[in-house]
Amino acid sequence: MKRPVTVNKKLVLGITGSFGSGKSTVAGMFKNFGAEVLDADKIAHQVISPGRAAYKKIVSLFGNGILKKNSEIRRDKLAKRVFGEKNLLKRLGRIIHPQVIRIMRERIKKSPKKIIVLDVPLLIEAHLDDLADKIIVVTAAQERQLVRLKQKTHLSRLDILKRIRAQMPILDKVRMADFVIDNNGTIGQTKKQVEAILGKMGILPRINSHSNLRSLMFRKLRAH
């Protein structure tokens, strides 16, 4: 997908991929180069907190059985209800996604940073790609995803596969990408791909201008 690199204004990079492909790890690498990261999952967690409009709609749709004793939504119970049932997942998305988009727009506008990264699992599905100047898709082999998620979560293999299959196929996301990061290798190999993307966009020196890594990055650019 050809999107022009933004000049003299904020550059917004949308990072997406499949469940467990390593999106947040890649987003963290961009943060280390000075970008601000907006995490859609964290924003969604805020959106469904008690008292919010989305919270009331979700409880009305799914009932009090998804609530903890302190009235917060049990996200694990909510996930079990919606994954595997496309209709329920879509209805939940229609409640949450507009609120997440609104908050992200506000934060992009208010951010003092010139480079902003959107860490969004459903970047394309939720139409958050409209906020991004460039789309970066992080890929990983399914077995790698399963291993990572088994280490990070208490989800069963079946539950992990349900979540992966509920998302847009990764090949469809790759077709819409401006850049693709192969996250099957080492952390160092992934970091090199991040550096290459920053170099291709011509923003590596600028994004890193206040970093201790500045001289190192200039040397890397000259080497290319």
Image (spheres, rainbow, N blue to C red):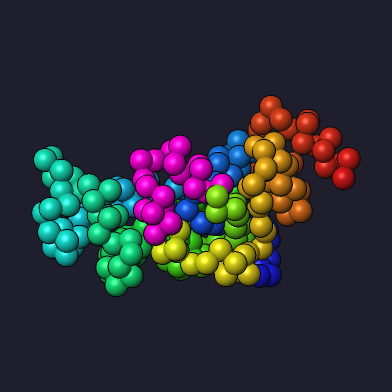
- Residue that appears at 44% across and 41% down: 150
Left or right: where 111 falls relative to 200? left
**Residue situated in front as seen by the camera: 170 or 126:** 170
Write the start and end of the magenta stretch as one range.
144-162
Residue 32 in sight here: yes
- Residue that appears at 20% across and 55% down: 55
| Rendered-image quadrant of the N terminus | bottom right
- Residue that appears at 51% across and 56% down: 18
Position in image of residue 191 (x %, y %): 68, 40
Q: Looking at the rendering, which quadrant does residue 53 occupy?
A: bottom left
Position in image of residue 184 (x %, y %): 64, 47
Position in image of residue 215 (x %, y %): 78, 30
**Residue situated in front as seen by the camera: 72 or 148:** 148
Vertical order, 6 against 51 (above or below): below
Q: Looking at the rendering, which quadrant does residue 167 occupy?
A: bottom left
Residue 135 on the magenta span: no
